[in-house]
Image: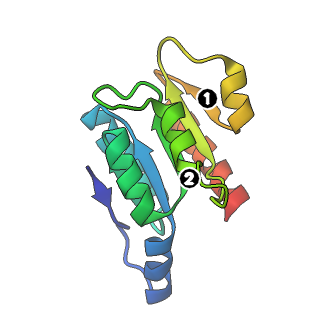
């Protein structure tokens, strides 16, 4: 698991916000997870970027970090859940606030209706990092 905190110095109120607001990155490939976490931390220094390599670890991290945005890999090798099942688990509580989510899919995507019904944005892999950053920035503008 990788947890990156803001790279720039922050005021105390920004530090408090960084503890409250996070992006959860769930990716089973460590190099890609580390890259995504590093780039997101550089682009969004006031947010806490939390990485998880398995669905179980993601459930644990989500309970502690209260993410405002999630990037999920669809095929989480070595996990009991895929990205959609993880999304469903995180939203199982009827009182849970919806978490805007982008799912990264390389092969054998689920039916598009499954994603649309949940409001999940699909990012085909391999993806353009700049396009992903634009998508994340747009999502953050809507929710913050």
SS class, disc 2: strand
Q: Residue at x 61, y 52 (%)?
A: 99
Identify residue for label 1: 122
Residue 31, above or below 24? above
Is residue 35 visible to us here? no
**Mark number for residue 69?**
2
SS class, disc 1: strand
Q: Residue at x 72, y 57 (%)?
A: 142
Residue 108 pos. (x, y %): 51, 11
Q: Residue at x 39, y 43 (%)?
A: 36
Is tag 1's residue or tag 2's residue first in the polypeptide sequence? 2
For disc 1, the neighbor class at 10 Å (few under 14, some 14 to 19, many from 20) is some
Q: CA distance from mark 1 to mark 2?
A: 14 Å
The quarter of the rendered structure image containing the C terminus is: bottom right
For disc 2, the neighbor class at 10 Å (few under 14, some 14 to 19, many from 20) is many
Give the farthest residue toward the top.
108
The one nearer the camera, 40 or 106, is 106
Quadrant assignment, res 96: bottom right
Residue 134 pos. (x, y %): 61, 43
The one nearer the camera, 40 or 70, is 70
Residue 35 pos. (x, y %): 33, 41
Residues at marks 1 and 2 touching, judged by CB atoms closer than 8 Å: no
Residue 93 pos. (x, y %): 60, 55
Is residue 10 visible to us here? yes
Give the farthest residue toward the bottom.
12
The one nearer the camera, 120 or 137, is 120
Q: Residue at x 48, y 39 (%)?
A: 86
């Amino acid at each position: 698991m990788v947890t990156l905190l803001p790279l720039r110095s922050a005021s105390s109120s920004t530090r408090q916000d960084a503890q409250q607001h996070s992006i959860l990155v769930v990716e089973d490939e460590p190099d890609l997870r580390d890259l995504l976490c590093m780039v997101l931390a550089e682009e969004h220094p006031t947010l806490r970027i939390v990485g998880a390599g398995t669905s179980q670890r993601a459930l644990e991290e989500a309970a502690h970090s209260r993410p405002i945005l999630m990037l999920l890999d669809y095929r989480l090798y070595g996990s009991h859940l895929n990205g959609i099942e993880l999304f469903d688990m995180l939203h199982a509580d009827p009182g849970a606030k919806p978490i805007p989510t982008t799912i990264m899919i390389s092969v054998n995507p689920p039916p598009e209706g499954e994603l649309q019904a949940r409001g999940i944005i699909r990012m085909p892999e391999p993806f353009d990092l700049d396009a992903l950053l634009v998508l994340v920035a747009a999502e953050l503008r809507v929710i913050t």
